[in-house]
Amino acid sequence: MSQVTGNWRKVFSIIWAGQFMSLLSSSLVNFAVIIWLSLETGSAEVLALAAISALLPQSVIGLFSGVFIDRWDRKKTMIMADGFIALCTLVIASLFYFGQMELWYLYLLLGLRSVGSAFHMPAMQASVPLLAPASELMRVAGINQVIQSVSNIAGPALGALAIGLMDIGYVLLFDIAGALFAILSLLFVRIPNPERTVQKGKGIKQVLGDIEAGIRAITFSRGFSLLFLFSIVATFCLMPVAVLFPLLTLKHFQGDTFQMGLIEVVWGVGMLAGGGLLGMLKIRTNKVVLINWMYIILGAVLALSGLLPPRGYAVFVVLTTIGGITGAIYNASFTAIIQEKIDPALLGRVFSMFFSISLFPSLLALMGTGFLADTIGISRTFVILGSAIGLVGILSFLVPEVTRAGEAGQGPA
């Protein structure tokens, strides 16, 4: 049941202010960690292991975290998740401050932040349909992309500056400040909770029943199930490529730290453009059609990036910008479809399970990143996996049930 109020724009403005500071600080710290690891080791395996540390806890916990997100107060869930992330970061930063510099501390920090994200991200996404009218969900998703994009633009620049001026332990303190600001903003808004459905049984039986209800929501039709499957396959192909972006700049294009940061910035500029377009316009095109085209364009961008000669860095910058645009449109479209089609009382489970299910195969792909980079080559990896993402989009166009899943009124009873 909708609980949207007339001042929903004001509520979102307050939430977005806090989320912006949190995302900006996280982007700053994440890129500083990437630079630190790249400069210290120059190893694809190390970067892949860092990515696995940041994804594995979320993928495991996310299988059942949505059950509790749908039961608990969603505002308190987000506050506790942000507080947990801030506390863990403070502990790791303290260890660095006292001279206990160890590579595995960063892996541990990334893993602990992933635990917090397993609760925060689904809770936030599941709250959106209760705060905004259904007709505005696409625009809200677009504005969320704008906020993320601005953070992705400014974060790498600030991260590169911070890691050049101070020790990695001090850089981590920015993440604490961002989390505290996000908590403060949530204290000034009311986030409604959906009407909860009562499941039979107690304890583990009730949890399993809640999980089963979430699975039924995802698999209510063949088209919707395939939509999720294609997204999982595309994510499986994209993850290794995303990890190798810094090394493609450093090794293939013989770039430096500034050029690494520039690639991050232009990706953010592209996402800003894509999110801004969605935020300003009411796009009535079937969202699945948009998603399919984004698969094809992004796949072509990645494949062409791998085919460029070492002197083609300028073209790589342009292609990366286009990739950012496609990423923003894909993310907003996919998120809006889920928020439109799924009962808000089930959204916590659906988002958390989708994140987990899509991350599991991605982790397997990341484990082979070092092998791909060292055996096949970084540029060839871009070509192969980019082509695979493009094929996902073509295949999705060939399945009519998937396209119908994006039409108005196509949802679970």
Image (cartoon, rainbow, N blue to C red):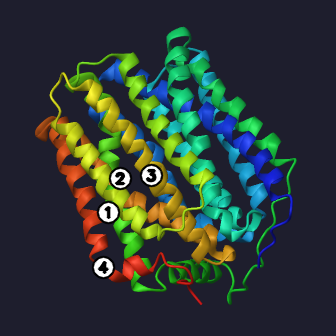
Separation (CA) of disc 4 from disc 3? 32 Å
> What's the residue at 85%, 52% (across, down)?
189
Secondary structure of the residue carrying numbered label 3: helix
Separation (CA) of disc 2 from disc 1? 12 Å
Query: Looking at the picture, which amino acid does disc 4 mark?
Result: Val
Pick whichever, 142 or 170, lies toward us. Answer: 142
Tell me: 315 left or right of 34: left
> What's the residue at 53%, 57% (across, down)?
332
Residue position marked by numbered label 2 in the rendering: 363
Select label 4 or label 1 by which is in front: 4
Query: Looking at the picture, which amino acid does disc 1 mark?
Result: Val
Mark before the other along the chain sequence, 4 or 3: 3
Is residue 378 positioned above or below 214 on the image? above
Separation (CA) of disc 2 from disc 3? 7 Å
* 10 Å crowding of disc 2: few (<14), some (14-19), many (20+): many
Select label 4 or label 3 by which is in front: 4
Tell me: 383 left or right of 162: left
Quadrant of the frame with the N terminus: bottom right
Secondary structure of the residue carrying numbered label 1: helix
Whether pointer 2 and pointer 1 mark residues with C-beta atoms closer than 8 Å, the reply is no
Query: Looking at the picture, which amino acid does disc 2 mark?
Result: Leu
Residue position marked by numbered label 3 in the rendering: 56
Whether pointer 2 and pointer 3 mark residues with C-beta atoms closer than 8 Å, the reply is yes
Select label 2 or label 1 by which is in front: 1
Query: Looking at the picture, which amino acid does disc 3 mark?
Result: Leu
Residue position marked by numbered label 4 in the rendering: 399
Task: Give the x, y percent position of residue 109.
Answer: 54, 36
Separation (CA) of disc 4 from disc 2? 27 Å
Residue position marked by numbered label 1 in the rendering: 233
Select label 4 or label 2 by which is in front: 4
Q: Residue 225 sits in which quadrant?
A: bottom left
Task: Give the x, y percent position of residue 142.
Answer: 58, 52
